Image (cartoon, rainbow, N blue to C red):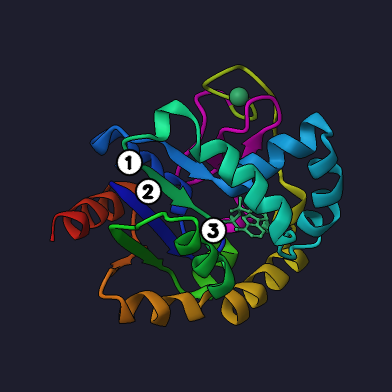
């Protein structure tokens, strides 16, 4: 099973990816996480990607595609995977097809901009392992400390309010056209992303079975 998760930044793609991942036992592949790893390791790609990410812009395709191709070629992806944060443009969707990746379904998690702006302000990530949390909807057991590894939680640079605005603009201009694109292919399933994580998860799994 190969799935795509669509949605604005902060719509909860990552969380829903984990839910599906537990349910279907296929890994979730987040280009955002792959990029952040590369930045942290200061690889050549990471160094190039950093300024784009910090300002909320899309990273050039050659970098994103190189990281993606390497990841989905790994053994654990051979029975399928969930793409979280890719494709983000129609051009990337076309490239995916050219790569021979046949997608079974596309889940679009819909959340209004105002709700997103509110959510993003509470987002925290572990600077050590990259796990993500939210001060209201997904708090850690100990404030500021990662449940998984004990690392310190920080606010991503791209979660600063001004950058969030820019990221939403990028989403509306460049990513939203994908909704129509996948609607035409009959693969699109729309999920209301509002409400608590459990409710949204139930809708996501129901959409997958429909
Ligand atoms: P979110 O979904 O919360 O916006 P991600 O973690 O998916 O955040 O992505 C963070 C940043 O990484 C994006 O703002 C962008 O700069 C870069 N990025 C991630 N995926 C892609 C992609 N498919 N194409 C181009 N840039 C990407
Ligand atoms: Zn951690």
Q: Residues at badges 3 and 2 in contact (C-beta under 8 Å)?
A: no
**Region of the chain picked out in magenta, as a range:** 119-142
Quarter holding ligand 1: bottom right
Q: Which mark is residue 95?
A: none
- Residue 141 in the magenta stretch? The answer is yes
With respect to residue 34, does 141 lie above or below?
Answer: above
Q: Earlier in the sequence, mark 1 or mark 3?
A: 3
Residue 155, how many percent across, how many down? 71, 44
For the residue labelled by badge 2, is the local secondary structure a helix, a strand or a loop? Answer: helix
Residue 44, how many percent across, how many down? 85, 39
Q: Which residue is mark 1?
A: 19
Whole-number angstrom distance, CA of label 3 to CA of label 2: 11 Å
Q: Quadrant of the C terminus?
A: bottom left
Q: Residues within 10 Å of mark 1 (few under 14, many from 20)?
A: many
Rendering quarter of residue 70: top right
Q: Which residue is mark 3?
A: 10
Rendering quarter of residue 173: bottom right
- Mark 3 CB within 8 Å of ligand 1: yes
Residue drawn at the location 34% of the way across and 62% of the way down: 107
């Amino acid at each position: 099973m190969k799935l795509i998760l669509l949605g604005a930044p902060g719509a909860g793609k990552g969380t829903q990816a984990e839910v599906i991942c537990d349910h279907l036992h296929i890994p979730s592949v987040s280009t955002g996480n792959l990029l952040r790893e590369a930045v942290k390791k200061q690889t050549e790609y990471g160094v190039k990607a950093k300024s784009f990410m910090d300002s909320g812009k899309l990273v050039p395709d050659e970098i994103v595609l190189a990281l993606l191709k390497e990841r989905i070629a790994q053994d654990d992806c051979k029975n399928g995977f969930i793409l979280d944060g890719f494709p983000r443009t129609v051009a990337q969707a076309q490239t995916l097809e050219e790569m021979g990746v046949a997608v079974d379904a596309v889940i679009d998690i819909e959340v209004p901009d105002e709700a997103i702006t509110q959510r993003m302000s509470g987002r925290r990530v572990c600077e050590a392992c990259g796990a993500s949390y939210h001060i209201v909807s997904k708090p850690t057991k100990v404030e500021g400390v990662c449940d998984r590894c004990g690392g310190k939680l920080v606010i991503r640079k791209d979660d600063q309010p001004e950058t969030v605005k820019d990221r939403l603009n990028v989403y509306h201009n460049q990513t939203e056209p994908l909704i129509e694109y996948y609607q035409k292919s009959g693969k699109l399933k729309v999920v209301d992303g509002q409400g608590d994580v459990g409710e949204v998860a139930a809708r996501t799994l129901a959409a997958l079975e429909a």
